[in-house]
Image (cartoon, coloured by chain):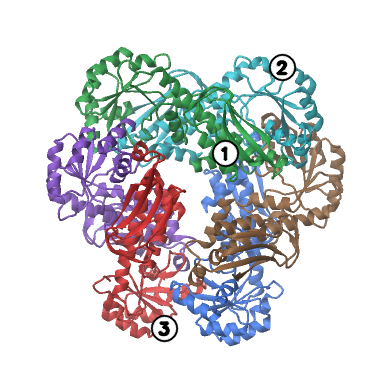
Chain colours: A red, B purple, C blue, D brown, E green, F cyan
Amino acid sequence: MEKLIEEALQEDIGPGDETTFALIPREAMARGSVVAKEEGVLAGVEVAAKVFSIADTGCNIVTRKNDGEKIKVGDTLMVVEGRAAPMLSAERVALNFLQRLSGIATETARYVEAVRGTPVRIVDTRKTAPGLRMLEKYAVRMGGGFNHRFGLYDGILIKDNHLAILRGRGMGCGDAVRLAKSKKTHTLIVEVEVTSLDQVRQAIEAGADALLLDNMEVEEIKAAVKLADGRVLLEASGGINLGNVRKVAETGVDLISIGAITHSAPSLDMSLEIEPI
Amino acid sequence: MEKLIEEALQEDIGPGDETTFALIPREAMARGSVVAKEEGVLAGVEVAAKVFSIADTGCNIVTRKNDGEKIKVGDTLMVVEGRAAPMLSAERVALNFLQRLSGIATETARYVEAVRGTPVRIVDTRKTAPGLRMLEKYAVRMGGGFNHRFGLYDGILIKDNHLAILRGRGMGCGDAVRLAKSKKTHTLIVEVEVTSLDQVRQAIEAGADALLLDNMEVEEIKAAVKLADGRVLLEASGGINLGNVRKVAETGVDLISIGAITHSAPSLDMSLEIEPI
Amino acid sequence: MEKLIEEALQEDIGPGDETTFALIPREAMARGSVVAKEEGVLAGVEVAAKVFSIADTGCNIVTRKNDGEKIKVGDTLMVVEGRAAPMLSAERVALNFLQRLSGIATETARYVEAVRGTPVRIVDTRKTAPGLRMLEKYAVRMGGGFNHRFGLYDGILIKDNHLAILRGRGMGCGDAVRLAKSKKTHTLIVEVEVTSLDQVRQAIEAGADALLLDNMEVEEIKAAVKLADGRVLLEASGGINLGNVRKVAETGVDLISIGAITHSAPSLDMSLEIEPI
Amino acid sequence: MEKLIEEALQEDIGPGDETTFALIPREAMARGSVVAKEEGVLAGVEVAAKVFSIADTGCNIVTRKNDGEKIKVGDTLMVVEGRAAPMLSAERVALNFLQRLSGIATETARYVEAVRGTPVRIVDTRKTAPGLRMLEKYAVRMGGGFNHRFGLYDGILIKDNHLAILRGRGMGCGDAVRLAKSKKTHTLIVEVEVTSLDQVRQAIEAGADALLLDNMEVEEIKAAVKLADGRVLLEASGGINLGNVRKVAETGVDLISIGAITHSAPSLDMSLEIEPI
Amino acid sequence: MEKLIEEALQEDIGPGDETTFALIPREAMARGSVVAKEEGVLAGVEVAAKVFSIADTGCNIVTRKNDGEKIKVGDTLMVVEGRAAPMLSAERVALNFLQRLSGIATETARYVEAVRGTPVRIVDTRKTAPGLRMLEKYAVRMGGGFNHRFGLYDGILIKDNHLAILRGRGMGCGDAVRLAKSKKTHTLIVEVEVTSLDQVRQAIEAGADALLLDNMEVEEIKAAVKLADGRVLLEASGGINLGNVRKVAETGVDLISIGAITHSAPSLDMSLEIEPI
Amino acid sequence: MEKLIEEALQEDIGPGDETTFALIPREAMARGSVVAKEEGVLAGVEVAAKVFSIADTGCNIVTRKNDGEKIKVGDTLMVVEGRAAPMLSAERVALNFLQRLSGIATETARYVEAVRGTPVRIVDTRKTAPGLRMLEKYAVRMGGGFNHRFGLYDGILIKDNHLAILRGRGMGCGDAVRLAKSKKTHTLIVEVEVTSLDQVRQAIEAGADALLLDNMEVEEIKAAVKLADGRVLLEASGGINLGNVRKVAETGVDLISIGAITHSAPSLDMSLEIEPI
């Protein structure tokens, strides 16, 4: 995380913050308060604190709200005291992390709220901003969601495009599952994307551990749940939004994955208010 | 850009794509088509092409649409031919870049369209995803927008927080402008954030080159335009959305900056369809 | 892999190969043959080829044996033709990779041979040389072994030290398994280290997917196999060597993990023989 | 060294230690003792300490044995107190360094012991694990050995392959020595690999400072010692093992280089025992 | 800056300071005083302090003179107390930074002194040592000079070579200025290199903000000043040295840029005197 | 070298060359000629070529003069043909390398010329620009000089400050030499800095291989040469310039080291002349 923050500061400050350099005396001290301008769920307060402390190792930071907490308009989220110049130079980077991560946590929390009372997990996808996956997946957890695999290395997920290649070699969905089971590291399960009840049946017979039900209608999902009968984990994915997520949750699937909680979550509005001390 | 792509591939693939490794023979060849599933403005097609060519230096890529072009649902945007295994491993990273950048270009284009016929520039802000600023600002240009400064190093923008520190030292907005002019590199202009007509007057008298009119109502902006009378560039900022941007543009300001075109643009939906060859 | 090779070349060559610089004219051309001086299983021939091609992008390389093949004393493994100076400077690094990886493949093959005819997998551990894990695990596969998890991120393995901490909080082996199942990413299984039949029973009842039987005697392993009765994967680990591995394999466990195939495999002897051309 | 350790931790932990994350509360504290399970010579205790302190900057470490000391089965080598979670995540990396380096020190000490009473130096070679040369050469010193050059940049060693290229240009061993002396930095000596008494004579006449006697029989080495008569340093190399090293040492050579002390030293067995505090 | 210093230490120390390692006991403590052996203007004292503190985090440093101060032969500039071994290893790197930067500050101060009493700014160029631009531009400020743009990204400067390309497309100096004004980020001014009074006129009419008068004679510069009449900033450049800089300053230009203050400033002589404590 | 060039380009271009971006069409092609504006010795032409080829992989470069050649005012040194935009963006970096390295080669050649006819080697020091040592030492060789050690790792040089620490422990110059000989890697010689004839005697008796005669007068150097009588290498250092170097050379020393050839060599003037094609 530190490397990421240093690169973000480097990206913004580059060879120097011209405005601050011209105007702010080196010895000027300040207090900066991060204030919420929109309600939501907080995520990234420690990241933001780290931004300020990397910019000015001597600054003093108090966090008033914790990641995962609900915040209201006007809430003071954290207070930084230290040298004014590095605080001004770090402001935008700190807010960029904090607003983005809180936006993701807030959007996730909306889905989690929508399925409250069901045993379904809201899970994320790999549709994250390049370079920020770990932080974005952390924000999903702060919003009450669960993580799907972190990358291609910690989960087997046989997707339509894998099946298309194998079909060209005369292999079906069940063959794919069997092949994966024979070759994979034993610490991973085998999940496979299916688009029909027929594939659901083949995959289960071949020994799949989990199925991703791709873009199925609610009725078809219900049929898949019945057919699976608890033998495999079921993940619904595709075309699911706040309007229909509860219906999908009530079908009895175990997981619902939502790309939008990371790739399209709007930023949560906040500002830094600085005063001299 | 290459380093960024390599890091994104490393982030997703890590020590290995377990699924592809288990299932796809090394010699299998494939054709992959990136297809639009939503209409909008394309941005990032060369980035996506670079992702595939880094993953498989021997692959062959044809781009069917160019950055900045309007695309419709079902349009084929680019076609990749090469080894199936690296294509599958690179799919998500290529799409993550392409969908995000096209989302930004598309959102920008909506604002540009809304002010069409006025001389106003829609400009971006520094509210970008950490590490991705250059690409996101490129996407803004592809959507017809203009870039504000890239970072703290290539523009002087005296903001409320700078003024707050200086106020604590008995200096006003005009003093700040004068100080900046005396100390800055001569290749940069001096822009200052103002919140009242009084500050507009002081800043102009002190020799500011541009003013950022922060969160002003349309009527106040009009008064500022009249007061400035062409002596400085005027940038409207804060609280501007697709519903009111035209009204703001018609006040006569030169620039309108919109954070949401980068920090809250939803991803544009696309998919990669792979077939064996 | 390229970064690793570049760092290894940098480590050996540093600011310059003083001997080659003083003696070998820039235009001198040479043929270099890598020859086996010991019998075993080859691994790393593509890594070695990459070393030479990074040192001299214009060189021509023919590999005569493939990774995973058995090699005999005197076999020519690969032939490089190109400029003499970079070939001399790259020699040691290429051999260091090739001899080390072939040593691991060879040691692994001895264990695989010893259990031939049983369905047991010989698997590796995380006891690898820092920085070289991916290559060493690749060498294990070339020797006929299978990989255990690559790191702490792609497998759940609850070990004695985790259980010790949890015991201090009043939790037993079964509680640990249940907690892990409730919190883990769904793409990973839960494996737990057990040291007694009682723990075997608790772990299975709590829903563990795999058990690591730590340092158990052959008779105790047999009892565990009987008790598990196919409900979980069983991995034998600790105190297993070429002398007793067959006995352990015949107990009916699914996996036998051997740290020594990576942490103590002796290098396989080879040399590079260069002649002018 | 810090960069190396950070990369090793990154290699093992990657995006996260899934087991520890799922099971160990953030506030849990622990004491971990590294205990020897085999006798030998310790090396790397400060490296291991650094691993733990990088993983948890607040931990408290006491080393009970120093690098270079002999250790017995059951000896506690170091004790770490701090947060349980990072200690568990760092365990394997710390042990991988410590066991490998102690393995090298122990193997080196066997050779040093074997030549005790003679003035011979046991020296290492460049046959080290890529990326770990400095640490492995440090371990050789801890075992009582001496270092040969660190890389191609801090020593001139004209080897058979250099001579082969020069032979193709009509130059012999003596010419090579003279050429090297005329071109080299004055801070380095010239050492040359020789395989016959005739070459010994030529090299000395040409002004060589040291000779590497390659794969010579003991009698031939004795003749070389007599011929050299103290005018140059003599290094015996090739085909030397614990069985014959004393005989070689008694010939009167100055240095004996042994590749196996780095490339084939078995790991020294140790474990980390953690308890809650 | 820290990364730069670490790389410089790595460049000098590499795998180890052989002399210090062989001679200086680890526990030896020392006091080192940096003493001026030439008079001039100091720059880089904090950089040098950082070198010592990176080499030995526990050392104690007192700076006796500040950057920008005039120093005389024999002045003690800073005193370091700490472990002798890292102080010896860091000596050369610290002095290399300090002597080079002080050399630049001293040369700059000579030019600043030569134009004292005029309102002209002495500014630097991009003719800096690769990798050291920020530090060298800092040294220019310490010598009383001002910085021109830091790189190609924070200033528009249309040079002869740009104009040559545009001429091939039928565009003149005025067209270039207009094109730049229509496309540039609004935070930057447009400066253009001119070589004749005719170009001065065209550039001003096209709206240029600043002109670089390239290699003009003093009389021609005077004519340009008269022609410009305060409408644009004027920078004289090329062929200016300590002998004629005052004459150029008295023409009424705003800025005089001098490449030699960075690319040809001789090092300022200093030494480190170490004594045991 | 590539990494260094990439960093230099990044330093200058940063997020983008604003001028070229605004003015030069992507498809514009150009020919650029590097022309000497001062006479001297060329060094760095391949570095400059690499700068252009990294900036535009498709460009075509012909070098007209080689490193080490004498060049006259007006000579064309190299010609680049390719896309105009990257050529313009790379111009300054290419020239910065080329002018600096040629400046060093030219200054070195002046000293080499001054001692022509004597057997003395002009050698460099470690007083180089941080990060550029390898290139600067290469330029010294191009100017006819020789390199001293590259860093602290490839040479033993016991300096006054080492002796000061050892003196505090009751050890003299001879003790230091003996200690270094007993501990050093056998591939390095022992050189020691001496300031009096008495130290010369002690060092030789202790077995030093080379002496650095620090700041001695010509008469004292002559006495040292006589005293040494060919038993050790002698290096004169300190206070030597073009005015007295010949006198020093004629004393019979083997090496004369000159810091100024790297730390104070003025840049050699050149320019890039671009025309459209």
Q: Is residue D199 above or below residue D274?
A: above
Taking A88 as reference, is F33 above or below it? above
Both marks 2 and 3 on one chain = no
* Amino acid tagged 1: Ile
Where residue A145 sits, quadrant-wise, is bottom left
- Measured from the top left, where is residue C259 in percent x and y? 64, 67
Residue bearing mark 1: E61
Corner quadrant of residue D52: bottom right
Indicate whether E246 appears above or below D166: above
Secondary structure found at label 1:
strand
Residue D30 in view, yes or no:
yes
The residue at which mark 3 appears reads as A231
Residue D24 image position (x, y, % from top left): 51, 70
Q: Nearer the viewer, residue A185 or A124?
A: A124
- State if disc 2 and disc 1 touch (CB < 8 Å): no
Q: Quadrant of the C terminus of chain E?
A: top right
Residue B94 appears anywhere in the view = no
Q: Position of residue B260 (x, y in %)?
A: 25, 54
Instruction: Tell me the residue at 70%/58% (across/down).
Output: D102
Is residue D4 rendered to the left or right of residue B158? right
